[in-house]
Amino acid sequence: MSDTNCITVLTARGATEILKTGGSQAWRLDASHAAKHQYLVCVQNSKKDWGSQEAKHHHAFMVGQISGVSRAPENPKRWIINIDSYAEIDIPDQWDGNRNPVSYRNLEDMNIDAMKLDFKPVSKVILSEVRDEKVGDENDIKPLNIKDAKAGLALYFGVSEDDIQITIQG
């Protein structure tokens, strides 16, 4: 298989924090391209002085099934790769030294067989608690510009931003 089917991230966050927030964040990436991938592979960066590292440096420690890509709550100019299920792994030497912490790869090239992984659901209770902490009341709607609205709708519907037309009537 030669296509990329996973996004690999070099992260200082550990599995506990990623599961608590429902995904890995806050990445600079092309959200429409990232949303087309099926899996997220997290590789530990334990050389940072922040985060919540739990795995050994450069070990792949988690595979998540991507459920979407959305604006990161902590930085709206960056993205969170959301997952709805995950499997714990421990595969050493999974970072090639690339300075960009986001890369597009293939699970097979990383010696990961998705069919052999034991995927567990990401707890919806934890996700709703995080949403309540970050967003507050569901009626607490924040202003949104046309560009961001088109980007979000394109991701949601799986179409190009150019295919989204927004009409405002006053």
Image: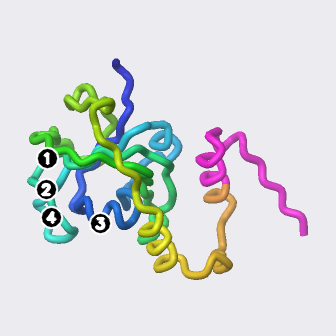
Q: Which mark is residue 48?
A: 4
Return the residue found at the far right: 170
Is residue 161 one of those drawn in magenta? yes
Quickly name the residue at label 1: 59
Badge 4: few (under 14), some or many (20 or more) residues near its Cα, within 10 Å?
A: few
- Type of amino acid at the residue the image marks with label 1: His
* Label 3 to label 1: alpha-carbon separation: 17 Å
Q: Earlier in the sequence, mark 3 or mark 1?
A: 3
Residue contact between numbered discs 2 and 1, judged by CB atoms under 8 Å: yes
User: At x 18% / y 53%, what residue is drawn?
Assistant: 44
> Nearer the N terminus, badge 2 or badge 3?
3
Task: Determine which residue is flagged by label 3.
Answer: 17
Few, some or many C-alpha atoms within 10 Å of disc 3 (few <14, some 14-19, many ≥20)?
Answer: some
In whole angstroms, how far apart are the C-alphas of marks 2 and 1? Answer: 7 Å
Which quarter of the figure has residue 149? bottom right
In the drawing, does residue 56 fall left or right of residue 142? left
Distance from the alpha carbon under mark 4 to that under mark 3: 15 Å
Q: Amino acid at mark 4?
A: Lys
Q: Earlier in the sequence, mark 1 or mark 4?
A: 4
